[in-house]
Amino acid sequence: MTEQATTTQYGGTIPAPPGPREVIPGAGPASRPGERATLRLRDTGDDEPARYAPEWLQLREPADAAARSYDLLDPLRIRLANLPRRADGLVIHDIGCGTGSMGRWLAPRLDGAQHWVLHDRDPYLLHFAAVASPRSAADGSHVTVETRRGDVARLTSDALAGASLVTASALLDVLTREEVGALAAACAGAGCPALLTLSVAGRVELTEPHPLDREITEAFNAHQRRGGLLGPDAVSVAAEAFAEHGATVRINPSPWRLGPGEAALTEQWLRGWVGAAVEERPELASRADGYLAERLEACAAGELRVVVHHSDLLALCRPADGAA
């Protein structure tokens, strides 16, 4: 049976996934002259499934776009304007790009020509990110894209040589302290700013309040910290890591605000949130079943409101050449 492409709400399509041994041109390890391969982390082989389902990334994209902090864009624009101008414009590395939502949000909000380097370990996601990337900047300048396959939480400053900016979305909380430290060191070594958005903050508000809200939240946060991952501690750890390298760090809230218009996202988020909590603390299972059913019923009726707190971080590293 032939796989079918999936139509997105933005009018584009998610291409059918490649076969198990097929490599999509442009999505394989960098091998052409002048390209640099990227490091892989926690990679157990090419047959390992994608960490994130593209359907989930597509579902959350509008909420992500609405949540990201616009207030961080002005200081970012000022820094980018003060960087030495390149003939080919800004070079922006998007780490763990998924389906490319960060580029679709940010590229049309920055002036000037841009070249986006999209990093992910899944060639299917990379292909969609490249196909669905924007083609013009805020002022109409051209936007180009290349892809680099690899799970690239650990980058060196050499891998970021010539970068104007590093971006990531929903990444910091799935990294370890060592990986965040390596990312901060790489950005500082390359002298480029970093805009790292939508890291979980460990706080959730649901209306109406329920006695189990706190227990579910605590269990979910514990689940996020499994295996040494930072979870809700990620932003504070990242801020410290960048500051140790002399960067100026700003943190702004970027909460999801979910109501009746986001019922499909709320339903999927609820199932994942409660499911992770129960996986962490199985003793919650009997009570959590009723809790989830009650919350889903309220969601379907248009009565549930949810605020899922996130944080955005802007780190303005010192330019490598000493420019302002």
Image (cartoon, rainbow, N blue to C red):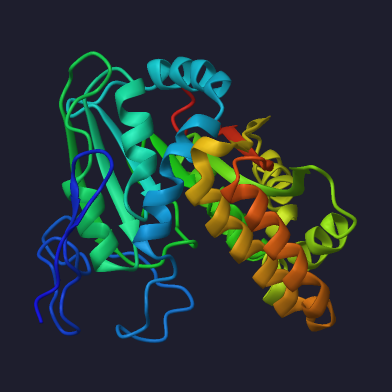
- In the rendered view, would you say 75 is above or below 29? above
Residue situated furthest right in the rendering: 211
Front-most of residues 18 and 321: 18
- Could you tell me if residue 96 is visible in this image? no
How far from the left and from the top, in percent, is residue 272? 60, 65
Front-most of residues 290 and 248: 290
How far from the left and from the top, in percent, is residue 314? 58, 32
Q: Write the residue at 18% across / 51% down.
A: 13
Q: Quadrant of the N terminus?
A: bottom left
Front-most of residues 188 and 199: 199
- In the rendered view, would you say 180 is above or below 123? above
Q: How many marks?
A: 0
Q: Is residue 74 left or right of residue 88?
A: right
Quarter occupied by residue 29? bottom left
Quarter occupied by residue 149? bottom left
- In the rendered view, would you say 206 is above or below 35? above
Q: Write the residue at 33% across / 56% down.
A: 119
- Could you tell me if residue 152 is visible in this image? yes
